[in-house]
Image: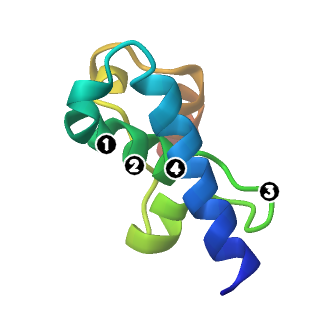
């Protein structure tokens, strides 16, 4: 198998292990959180996130709609100036 394939699987297992360290019984419920973390983490090899590659848009957390991040505020100003 491809080395990148196994690196991705290891990353997912590592994140899932961190999330369910206290209670291993509900790992299947926390799998969605681990997948979201893997998909929205910036990758140096591709210079982007897997989410952006798959869907063509940046992932925005629901929290960022209520409390805008500095990056989103700068992007919005840049869009308004054009």
**How has the structure been colored for display?**
rainbow
- Depth order, front residue of 80/11: 11
- Mark 2 or mark 1, which is nearer to you? 1
Residue at coordinates 28% horizontally, 43% vertically from top-left?
32
Badge 4 marks a residue whose secondary structure is helix
Q: Residues within 10 Å of mark 1 (few under 14, many from 20)?
A: some
Q: Residues within 10 Å of mark 2 (few under 14, many from 20)?
A: some
- Depth order, front residue of 56/39: 39
Q: Which residue is the site of mark 3?
A: 44
Are dots 2 and 1 in contact, CB under 8 Å? yes
Q: Earlier in the sequence, mark 4 or mark 1?
A: 4
Q: Which label sits on residue 12?
A: 4
Alpha carbon distance from label 3 to label 1? 24 Å
Q: Earlier in the sequence, mark 4 or mark 2?
A: 4
Alpha carbon distance from label 4 to label 2? 7 Å
Q: Which residue is the site of mark 2?
A: 35
**Residue 27 placement (x, y as % from top left):** 28, 34
**Residue 46 placement (x, y as % from top left):** 73, 68
Q: Which residue is the site of mark 1?
A: 31
Is the residue 28 above or below the residue 44 in the image? above
Q: Earlier in the sequence, mark 2 or mark 3?
A: 2
Alpha carbon distance from label 3 to label 4? 17 Å
Q: Earlier in the sequence, mark 3 or mark 1?
A: 1
Alpha carbon distance from label 2 to label 1? 6 Å
Residue at coordinates 41% horizontally, 40% vertically from top-left?
34
Badge 3 marks a residue whose secondary structure is loop
Residue at coordinates 59% horizontally, 30% vertically from top-left?
71
**Residue 3 placement (x, y as % from top left):** 75, 76
Q: Residue furthest right?
A: 44
Is the residue 1 above or below the residue 7 in the image? below
Which quarter of the picture shows residue 4? bottom right
Are dots 4 and 2 in contact, CB under 8 Å? yes
């Amino acid at each position: 198998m491809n080395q990148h394939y196994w690196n991705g699987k290891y990353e997912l297992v590592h994140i899932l292990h961190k999330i369910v360290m206290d209670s291993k019984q509900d790992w299947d419920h926390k799998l969605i959180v681990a997948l979201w973390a893997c998909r929205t983490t910036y990758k140096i090899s591709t210079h982007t996130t897997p989410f952006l590659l798959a869907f063509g848009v940046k992932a925005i957390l629901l929290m960022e709609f209520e409390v805008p991040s500095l990056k989103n505020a700068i992007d919005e100003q840049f869009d308004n100036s054009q």
